Amino acid sequence: MREVRFREALREAMSEEMRHDERVFLMGEEVAQYDGAYKVSQGMLAEFGEKRVIDTPISELGFAGIGVGAAMNGVRPIVEFMTWNFAVLAFDQIINSAAKMLSMSGGQFHCPIVFRGPTGSAGQLGAQHSQTFEAWMGSVPGVKVVSVSNPYDAKGLLKSAIRDDDPVLFMESEVMYGDVGHIPDEEYLIPIGKADIKRAGTDVTIVSYNKMMKVALGAAEELAKEGINAEVIDLRTIRPMDYETLVQSLKKTNRMIVVEEAWPFASVSAEIAYSMQRFAFDYLDAPILRITGADTPVAYAPNLVAEFLPNTGKVIRAAKEVMYLKK
């Protein structure tokens, strides 16, 4: 195992797949000459050349459409959005073209394309640049949605996404690009659609994804000091969701908390809460609680951003509530 930064894990995944398959190419704003807005694609232009690492105009709808058309014609594009907030402009191509092409063509046209970039709040970026998109995109049939929390998962899942024959929406966080983690020297892939138990426990299950995994794991460590043994599950894939891993954990702990950055209405946590009461109601010893972002646009002031987001204190209080240690 060796240490790499999050951005380096993503770069390795893309570079290895471009060496493995000449049909794979990268396109997006500043991915080539500038080495990427977050230096994820640093050095890739020098290795692969301007025909496979392509700078685009500031036109998300346009270059997303180019990517979809290219994917339908036999190549495998990776389309980088500088932020998923900008990808709102490209939703027509993602939702109405990429997601529906296999169905509308009667199975004749796959669309093997990866759309990737950072999602969620990254500090003082204001309401228009701080939104979380997993639930938005996860509600669309025809796409797969991956949201990663660490370098190991990022590399293994991105390689799987690039090899997938269907559109994959790959969610990162710009505040984690400098995070360090361990990955093996040899090649590995992580299957899309499989959650991961990051911390085994017996008393309460905490479910999360992306950078909120830090909150979940931090809360679990604090709870352990008070004798509450929390199991922490990283969803990794939002669609298709690994309901089986969630059910098996709930059968063991009988309590569940879901932590996510997104707004509470029609969210990933709402889907999980509904599904668990449907699939595992008899195992519940307490209501499933959700710790989400506030139901407001994200403010600019740092104290209001902090208030908007989930934190370890909120998760600890929720855990004690479902353990009936706090009214």
Image (spheres, rainbow, N blue to C red):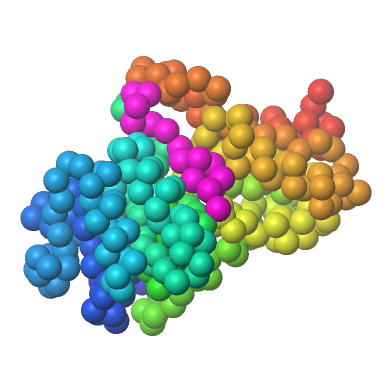
> Which residue in the rendered view is the most extreme toward the right?
282
Name the one closer to the observer, 301 or 199: 301
Q: Is residue 148 left or right of residue 16?
A: right
Q: Quadrant of the C terminus?
A: top right
Q: Position of residue 221 (x, y in %)?
A: 62, 46
Q: Nearer the viewer, residue 108 or 47?
A: 108
Is residue 63 in view? yes
Asked if the stretch drawn in magenta spans residue 135, the answer is yes
At x 84%, y 51%, the residue is: 280
Question: Residue at horizontal 23%, vertical 62%?
Answer: 26
Q: Is 186 on the left or on the right of 102, as rendered?
A: left
Q: Quadrant of residue 285?
A: top right
State the residue at coordinates (60%, 64%): 194
Using the image, determine if residue 323 lies above or below residue 254: above
The quadrant of the picture occupied by the N terminus is bottom left
Q: Which residues are magenta?
A: 126-141
- Residue 123, can we see it? no
| Percent x, y of residue 117 | 33, 49
Which residue appears at 36% of the width and 72% of the height? 2
Verify whether residue 33 appears in magenta. no
Residue 45, how many percent across, how many down? 12, 65
